[in-house]
Amino acid sequence: MSSSLVYVLRRLIQAIPMAFAIILVNFVLLKLTPGDLVDVMAGESGSATPEYMDSLRKLYGLDIPVHEQFFNYIYNILHFDLGYSFRQNMAVIDLISERLPATILLSVTAIVFALIVGVAFGAIAARYRGGLLDEAISVISTMGFATPLFWVGLMLIVLFSIELRWLPSAGLVTIGASYAGYWDEMRDVAVHLVLPALTLSLFFLSIYVRITRSAMLEVYGLDFVRTARAKGVGGLRLILRHVLRNALLPIVTITGLQVGAIFGGTIVTETVFGWPGVGRLAHEAVFSRDVNLLLGIFLCSSMIVIVVNLFVDLLYAVLDPRVEVRR
């Protein structure tokens, strides 16, 4: 058995107690919050009697001790059952499966755009260190750090949807649209994707600019770069083949760490733009106190982060042969 396969199997085994800890923490935190689904439903009705509320708690399994609820939840997970959303009248796994593709599309588009543009601008800033370009890029990246996502989204809607009328302000597709073919539908989705993806990517783009600039400036000072310059290597070849390639490891590390953060950012972005993804579903679940749905969303998000970070660890060995996955 190859060392890479052994490493993957070891990491998957290590993920089991990690997943259990995530489930336990999420369950305890949600149970510690005041009120429950029945309290929300009683508040909405305005005339619920104590007897009716007790019957609802018995129906939803909220009348049994908390530790029994937890063990029942673990048992259901082991049988690939994430529970039932009584607010949405659907199985949690069906709700997440229905919304997850939209969130993945938004997240991947945002992170790829942020990665490409951020690395490019970071490389330019490092190449012209101390110059006007470096100063301008630093100011723009600082603004990206400081500006809240919801404000960026609202301003983009005002500019491109209301004033210029270039792009739609909400949704995944145009409601009631009839498409001549598959490519027409994809074009409509792409147009709706522009504003939310741009909003979500700005913060992460700023991070990539800073990390790339710092990593490349460090590599520029190493001996092998000076040797390459002495041999006549310069310009774009020096940047791509010698400097940027050796500065990629911290960039890849940040990308793995940002996967969890970007799922958090989708909650705000999807709510602002009415994007039908898991983030917006989580926002709705919080206000309706849909604990089963929230637990399912948290679990799926955590598993995606674990898998992505495993992939990042394996990618290290590809980018730098000195890294051995068996360690």
Image (cartoon, helix red, strand yellow):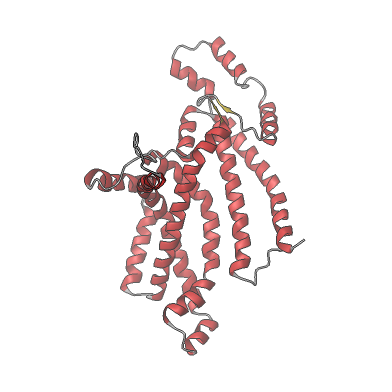
Q: In the picture provided, is 83 more to the left or to the right than 166?
A: right
Looking at the rendered image, the quarter that the C terminus falls into is bottom right
Q: Which residue is rendered at x = 40% and y = 47% of the image? A: 186
Q: Tell me the quarter of the image containing the N terminus.
A: bottom right
Q: Against 84, is 322 above or below?
A: below
Name the foreground residue: 170 vs 297: 170
Task: Tell which of 246 and 43 is nearer to you.
Answer: 246
On screen, residue 237 above or below 135: below
Residue at 31 percent across and 72 percent down: it is 132
Please provide percent x and percent y for residue 238.
47, 79
Residue 147 placement, left or right of 108? left
Is residue 136 shown above or below 43? below
- Relative image position of residue 27 (x, y in whole percent): 61, 34
Query: Is residue 199 at all visible to an observer of this figure?
Result: yes
Q: x, y percentage for residue 50?
A: 54, 11
Question: Residue 287, relative to residue 53: is it above or below?
Answer: below
Image x and y of residue 72, in percent? 69, 29
